[in-house]
Amino acid sequence: MQNQKHLVHLKEGIHYLNCAAKSPLLIKGEAAMHKALDREKNLHLRTANDFFDRPETGRKLFASLVNCEPKQVAFMPAVSYGLSSVLKNVPCSQGQHAITIESEFPSDYLALESWSRKHGAPIKIIGPNDCNQPLSDWNERIIDAITNNTAVVVISAIHWMNGYKYDLKAIGERCKEKGSIFIVDGTQAVGAMKIDVKAFNIDALICAGYKWLFGPYSIGCFYMSERFNDGTPIEESWMNRTNANKFSKLTNYGMTYTDGAGRYNVGETSNFLLMPVFLEGMKQVIEWGPENITEYCTNLAIPLHNHLKAKGLDVDQSLFASHLFSISLPSNMNPNDYTQSLADHSIYVSARGSGVRVSLNVFNTEEDINMLIETLS
Ligand SMILES: Cc1ncc(COP(=O)(O)O)c(C=O)c1O
């Protein structure tokens, strides 16, 4: 795959290695936003179908990325919303517990903590043996911790700070075997690597749109498996009822929810300004292909990993995502100061934990990597 920088808005001389924070705006995304604004200026052209057609297209796009039925996809404003929607429908029996990983993203952890308080069920937090050098045994530790008493496992597909790859297939199999509900935060993975809810036995997959799906902030998607189809949403929107498109009869309050995960959609799902940009993002990612993106990032990062290896700083790369990984800093260095010093050279990365998080995508170039290597030297 060739470099795709020409398709995004990034100024010359800017080395943006920070897609894990926010993807750059696609040129097509900007055009879609302009078109949407133009439509706002011509509201007389808006039809009843406009409320529902784009979300329908979005469900199909997300479904094709994660291998599920489109009707099992719902829209949300934030990962916190998706997690709360799922966890509201996760039951808990006496003696059961939840499992998550050490330093999980707050939107996941805090939703689980609320679930834990509601049910009086403890959370088991599974860490690696060594936080700075997580090894393959982290996956084994998670799998071993899942027992017949595990109600739910909440885990990110990769660790958001250092890109550690969780073995979703093995964890999903174990959850299935033990009857535990498997919830995955795909925010830092969907779009940049292959995620398959069926192959991995995932019960719910929550995914912000503004990173690897090239969407705008405040819109994302989540998959809820069929097991949640009779569940209770966290709010009641008129749009999620089967009579919603009959505008003249809305007060014949429809008592049936739309199919699949339809009941979990956030109100005002149409999101006339953000939705078109999000759709362009997902279309582009599908066109590129998540597996091709993985391969591109793997190849692009080779000189950087060679450089780190020569300095004794590299870890076993097979354990980490190729699009998101961390460079450890000596303990006397402050990651925030270091990130600022890189920004002074127009290199943009993130300080996360005790390291510097580097994230790559197909808009990054060899020059970006060479600049980082030069500055690290
Ligand atoms: C793993 C992960 N989940 C979720 C989010 C965003 O959460 P929210 O949409 O609730 O702000 C981030 C943001 O960096 C993230 O890295």
Image (spheres, grey):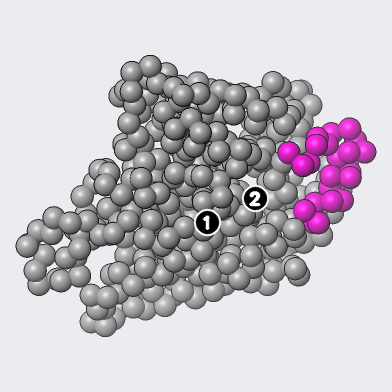
User: How far is the residue under mark 1 from the one under mark 2?
Assistant: 23 Å
Where in the figure is residue 362, as x and y percent of width and height? 69, 62
Q: Is residue 361 magenta?
A: no
Q: Relative to 168, is 215 above or below? A: below
Where in the figure is residue 320, as x and y percent of width and height? 71, 41
Q: Relative to 326, is 242 above or below? A: below
Residue 286 quadrant: bottom right
In this rendered view, identify the residue nearer to me: 22 or 172. 172
SS class of the residue under badge 1?
helix
Q: Is residue 309 magenta?
A: yes
Decide which of tag 1 and tag 2 comes sooner along the chain.
2
In the rendering, which numbered label is found on residue 18? 2
* Secondary structure predominantly adopted by residues drawn in magenta: helix
At label 2, counting other C-alpha atoms closer than 10 Å, the crowd grade (few under 14, some 14-19, many 20 or more) is many
Amino acid type indicated by mark 2: Asn
* Residue at horizontal 40 percent and vertical 21 percent from the top: 96
Kindly tell me whether residue 256 is visible in this rendering. Answer: yes
Q: Which segment did they paint magenta?
A: 298-319
Left or right of 54 on screen, residue 316: right
Find out if the beta carbon at label 2 lies less than 8 Å from the nearest ligand 1 atom: no
Where in the figure is residue 161, as x and y percent of width and height? 63, 37
Q: Which residue is label 1 attached to? A: 66
